[in-house]
Amino acid sequence: MAKWGMVIDLDKCTGCQACTTACSMENNTLPGETWQDVLYYTAGENPSGQMKWLPRPCMQCENPSCVHVCPTRATYKDEEAGGIVFVDWNKCIGCKYCMIACPYGVRFYADEKPLIEPDIRDVFPGENGQLWSPPYQNPEEDWRRGIGIQPPGVVSKCTFCYHKVRHAPEGVADLDEDNPEVKEYVPACVRTCAPKARYFGDLDNPDSQVNRLIGDKHGVRLKDHTGNRPQVYYLGAGAGVPAFTPADRENDA
Amino acid sequence: MSTSMKGMQPTTHGNALQGPLGWGLLVIAGVVLLASLGYALSQLMTSGHTAFNTSSVLPWGLPIATYVYFALASSGLGLVASLPLVFGFKAYYPLAKRCIFLAFALLISGMGVLALELGHPFRMLWVIPANLQVQSAMFWMGVFYSLDLLFLLWKFGKLQGGHWDSKTARQVGIASFIGVLLASGNLALIFGMMSMRPFWFDALMPVYFYATGITSGVAVLILLTYLAYGFRRERMPAALQRLMSGALPRLFAALVGATLLFIVVRAITGLYSNNPEVNLVWSEYLLESGLYLTSLVVGLLLPFVLLLGGLRNRPGIQVLTAVLVSLAMFAERLYFVVGGQVVPLFKGSWVPDLIAYTPSATEWALTLVGVSLCLVLFLLGEKFLNLGDMPPQMTQAPAGDPAAGDPAVEASRA
């Protein structure tokens, strides 16, 4: 079985947020429930100040702290599905402990105040147990893997677009959107990336492009000191996010 | 104060809550409970958890802090009850039964608030035992607090049956003591084991929770014990009067002092640390908050000073300090729970700031549900379960007898 991994080249990423938009459309997420987003921040100060950005999907960690803390096994790492971390919406009790335990902030409890008004949940009220029911929905729904639109009171997260990835041919090394044979199986954020900053493939396959990129271009994992060992790797400058400083104190640092 | 007895039953003539006052307070607490529960449920049913001001970046707010406050006050009282029932400090017998019942009432109230905070409380009942995720501290929280509740009820049943010192009562007492240590220690580790939340990450968090849990428990106990006797110490049984003017206020002073010490060393460590996820919580959030500073100075430091000297034996001072410390400990729980989350996991987005959180009306209603439910249970207990009960030999000792309740003398008598 493959071990799906993602490589994001920060030297190529333009911060255009197409990935964020594609993810939101593919997975019918609410405003603010950004399973995949791009963080913008400044680092340093004049004359060496920098403007940086960082795309942030779920890291699908090899040693996921969210899975360890879940009291119901609702969140689990599915080795049969390439090591993707899922949330079983039939088991989640909404205790939100996984959101506390995740060092990357990529879990969402969408049953919260709306980010923008009008609340789109009021515009498209939920039907059949869904939190909200927009007219277009991804037809592939699998609540045991947190795919589709969630019911109220559960945690949601990026699934590496498993509803697409799972159709990939057995043994394929890379899911490259430029390869017509597999392009339908590529995660939405990867397929839409205009500067081709994202790569998706099998970390267990020695011939995969993701492995070559990690090896040749010094791939690093975000917040590696947490020991969570992400299956998402970053290339180029910028994966070292500076420490948080409140805006009013930045000049004091 | 009457020390007359009917058979082996101690007198409860002084208990103000068994009269009209008890009914009056019960009606008020019941109305508050129904109103706050009604409001909270209507909000939750119509708006779901959008009625909370928590969010995906700050998922745990006031309801969790309320649960932690109640659960730890309950554990604190469970530990205080162990003083006479496990460790032989018989001077504490007059409060043992009230301690255990209050521990039960507090725990039920805390669990009730927690249930209303969860996304799917009823699913929890089957999905946790069915999946046995032993890696999760929250799984063990469920196990240990359920055992704690069971042992509290069992122990209370023993005392209700007059078995103060039987072999089984002692064994249940020891089991309950261990249950309390495991439950509250494990609750501490839910926070203390989170290395990705450095403000909480602390192997000694259980010790902090034990100490501060007893402090909050004793504060509630003192307040409600005075309430039971109409805020008049002379209406209390002699043995209880001795305890309230001797060992208990001294213990309370020491506990408030220990709590202050814990907070001060945590503050010093946090301010000294370069790690912004700890440092900023203290420098930019806790010590910048007027309410938090007030809770420290007025709610802990002032009571500590008042309790240091001879003033501590005055009923008025005891009630005042109990109220102040109860409120301060509640604030401490809220700032502790929120403090671990206010620093964003990533520096990000234009004007980075600490994550803002102010509890919503629904969240405060849940806190009110907890407080009023606890009061209703307590008032029912005082009215029908004789919470001031104590072993017969203690009620027989005349007021002012220094030997009564002395473990050494009790032992030599035995």
Image: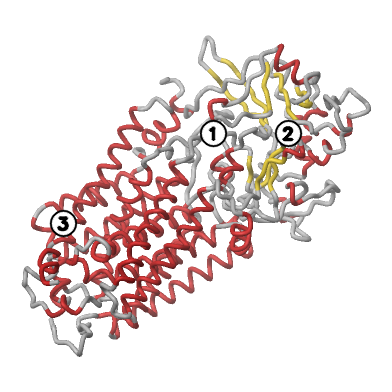
Residue under label 2: A20
Horizontal side of residue B211 vs A52, given as left or right: left
Residue under label 1: B345
Residue lying at 21% horizontally and 66% vertically, measured from the top left: B92
Horizontal side of residue B234 vs A57, given as left or right: left
Name the residue nearer the viewer: B40 or A235: A235
Labels 3 and 2 touching (C-beta < 8 A):
no
Labels 1 and 3 touching (C-beta < 8 A):
no
- Model colouring: secondary structure
Q: Amino acid at mark 3?
A: Arg
Residue under label 3: B250
Name the residue nearer the viewer: A54 or B251: B251
CA distance for labels 2 and 1: 19 Å
At numbered mark 2, what does the secondary structure look like: helix, strand or loop? helix
Whether residue B314 appears in this view of the structure is no
- How far across and how far down the image is residue B201, in percent? 43, 37
* Chain of the residue under label 1: B
- How far across and how far down the image is residue B135, in percent? 55, 46
Name the residue nearer the viewer: B111 or A62: A62
